[in-house]
């Protein structure tokens, strides 16, 4: 809550995904900001501020430096600024479907902040414009989302937790006809967010990872058959490979032999 006896003037505008609030105050303030639905990127026109996150991390803010307030984090603040701008960003615009992320503040000297600073100078008045056409607003929202994600990286623990949930879901449901949307739902990301995490962490798409997991399970079954009689068709279908030719091609690329060669080789070893 802000300090008593401080008055505020607001200018607001935008849409559900992205909105702007300009604030003028008449004096120093301090208080707390609890968790909220949206992420907030804010910057000061004058003065300075000190933010302390609920995990104890402290951030000093100087004029013109964009800082992100992650939606699930509570902050204590002190500031003597009289003019500030806040950009409210829906988590879904950043590819988050369920649990909003925590973000790491870049170092004030990090040149990654410069593209965002330039973008903010360019877009704030346009976001505030009530007559901005819907198509232009959507394009502007995507542009902001791209630059914000390139400036503020998700906290490592957050990324790792989501990644672990996605990977566990893939392996638990490898025999089921799951989709990218199913995996995204399981780890609390949108499909776009899931694609981004997999590309950055594993350099593959989620569906490529799922295919590799299924190939591993098929290979394990073909090499651990015991006395059971299995066919390549049965194994392929069990692991959701509907096209036998493509299954055989992917299998050979991964294991250096065809499924039939695996059966023949392991059968020979067990005579």
Image (spheres, helix red, strand yellow):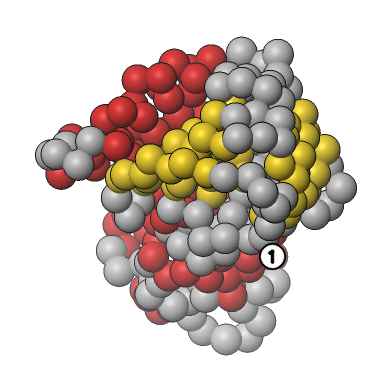
**Residue beneath disc 1:** 269
Which of the 4 image quarters holds residue 52?
top right
Which of the 4 image quarters holds residue 104?
top right
Camera-side residue of 191 and 167: 191
Q: Judging from the image, what secondary structure is the residue with disc 1 in?
A: helix
Where the N terminus falls, by quadrant? bottom right
Residue at position x 70%, y 52% from top?
4
Task: Report the side of 20 relative to 214 (left or right).
Answer: left
In percent of width and height, residue 131 lies at: 14, 39
Task: Report the side of 137 relative to 79 (left or right).
Answer: left
Task: Report the side of 23 relative to 17 (left or right).
Answer: right
In percent of width and height, residue 199 lies at: 51, 40
Where the C terminus falls, by quadrant? bottom right
Residue at position x 87%, y 48% from top?
56
Residue at position x 60%, y 35% from top?
26
Question: Could one spot residue 223 in this view of the protein?
Answer: no
Question: Could one spot residue 13 in this view of the protein?
Answer: yes
Q: Indicate whether 173 appears above or below 147.
A: below
Name of the residue lying farthest toward the right? 56
Q: Indicate whether 94 appears above or below 25.
A: below
Camera-side residue of 263 and 24: 24
Camera-side residue of 118 and 182: 118
In percent of width and height, residue 66 lies at: 58, 28
Q: Indicate whether 183 appears above or below 6.
A: below
Q: Indicate whether 20 appears above or below 216.
A: above
In percent of width and height, residue 235 lies at: 45, 74
User: How dense is the environment of label 1, judged by Cα within 10 Å: few (below 14), some, or many (20 and up)?
Assistant: few
């Amino acid at each position: 809550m802000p300090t008593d006896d401080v008055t505020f003037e607001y200018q607001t505008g935008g849409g559900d995904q992205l909105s702007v609030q300009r604030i003028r105050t008449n004096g120093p303030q301090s208080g707390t900001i609890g968790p909220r639905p949206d992420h907030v990127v804010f910057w000061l026109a004058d003065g300075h501020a000190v933010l302390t996150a609920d995990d104890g991390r402290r951030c000093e803010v100087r004029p013109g430096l964009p800082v992100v307030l992650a939606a699930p984090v509570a902050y204590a603040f002190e500031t003597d600024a009289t003019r500030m701008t806040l950009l409210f960003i829906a988590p879904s615009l950043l590819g988050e479907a369920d649990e909003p992320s925590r973000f790491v503040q870049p170092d004030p000297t990090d040149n990654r902040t410069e593209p965002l600073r330039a973008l903010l100078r360019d877009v704030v008045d346009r976001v505030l414009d009530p007559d901005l056409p819907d198509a232009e607003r959507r394009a502007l929202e995507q542009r902001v989302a791209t630059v914000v994600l390139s400036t503020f990286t998700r906290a490592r623990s957050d990324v790792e937790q989501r990644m672990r949930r996605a990977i566990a879901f893939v392996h638990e449901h490898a025999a089921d006809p799951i989709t990218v949307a199913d995996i995204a739902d399981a780890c609390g990301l949108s499909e776009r967010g899931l694609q981004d995490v997999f590309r950055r962490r594993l350099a593959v798409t989620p569906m490529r990872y799922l295919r590799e997991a299924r190939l591993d399970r098929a290979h394990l079954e073909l090499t651990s058959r015991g006395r059971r009689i299995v066919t390549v068709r049965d194994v392929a279908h069990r692991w959701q490979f509907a096209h036998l030719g493509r299954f055989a091609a992917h299998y050979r690329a991964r294991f250096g032999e065809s499924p039939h060669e695996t059966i023949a080789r392991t059968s020979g070893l067990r005579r």
